[in-house]
Amino acid sequence: HINADEPDILDYDTTFKLPAQDALYKDDPYRASDHDPVIIGLDLCDEIAPEATITLSKTTLWPPNHKYVTVDATVSPSDNLDANPTVTLLAVTSNEPDNGVGDGDQSNDIVIVSDTQFNLRAERAGNGTGRIYTITYQITDSCGNSVPATATVAVPLNKGGKNGEASGADASAIEDTGEVNALFLPMIQN
C-alpha cells in the first residue's frame, strides 16, 4: 500500500467470505485486486529542436590593419520544453587561410578567449573578396534535440562608401566559397 491501510469495511469486506476467498484478499503488496494507484514515470520529450539568436558586439572589422579586435557573443537559446538548453561553442572558422598570401603574413587570426569572446584579426587577402569569420554553436535541449547556430563577422575588401566606410560591410557582400581554411576549436580544460 502506498497510503495507510483503510478499514476492512472500505478496503475489502471479508465478513461473509470463506477462508479460501479471504486468502485472495490477503493484505500484501502482491494481491491481484489491490486498488492502490499505479505509479509510472512519464518521459515528456519532443522532437522539436531548440532555437537560438546570436548577437555579436561587432559584425564588421574595419580597417584591415592586422590588429586583433575583441568580439563578444551573446547566445539566447529557446525551446518549447526546456527552459535552459545547453549552448556549446563548436568552432570559429575563416574562409581565408590563417597565413595566406596577400593578407599581411600574420598568423593566429583567431584567438578563442572564452565560449563567448574571441579576438579576431582585422585582416583579409588583398586579392580576394573579403574575409568571413563564422562562429558556430550547438544548441541542445534536455530531450537531446540539437541544432547548430551561426553568426558571422566580415572583413570587407574595400573602403569606398560615404565618409570612408567599408563597402560591402556585411557578410552577404562577401563571396563565401564554403571552403574553410582556418579552423579553431575551443580548448577544453579538465
Image (cartoon, helix red, strand yellow):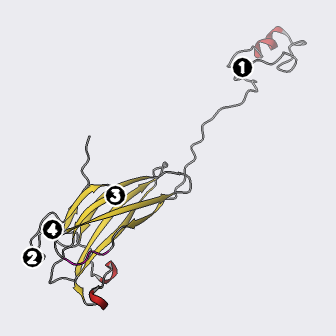
Q: Quadrant of residue 55?
A: bottom left
What's the CA distance linking mark 2 and mark 1?
A: 82 Å
Q: Which mark is residue 101?
A: 2
Depicted 101 relative to depicted 9: above or below: below
Q: Which residue is mark 4?
A: 98
Callout 4–callout 1 Cβ contact below 8 Å: no
Closer to the eye: label 4 or 3: 3
Which one is nearer the viewer's eye here, 87 or 37? 87
Q: Residues within 10 Å of mark 1 (few under 14, many from 20)?
A: few
Using the numbered discs, state the Cα–Cα distance from disc 2 to disc 3 in whole angstroms: 30 Å
Amino acid at pointer 1: Arg
Helix, strand or loop at disc 1?
loop
Mostly what secondary structure, the magenta segment? loop
Quadrant of residue 131 within the rendered picture: bottom left
Q: Nearer the N terminus, badge 4 or badge 1? A: 1
* Distance in Å between CA atoms under marks 1 and 3: 59 Å
Magenta-colored span = 60-64
Q: Which residue is mark 1?
A: 31
Q: Do the CB atoms of the residues marked 4 and 3 lie less than 8 Å apart?
A: no
Instruction: Tell me the kind of residue under disc 3.
Output: Thr
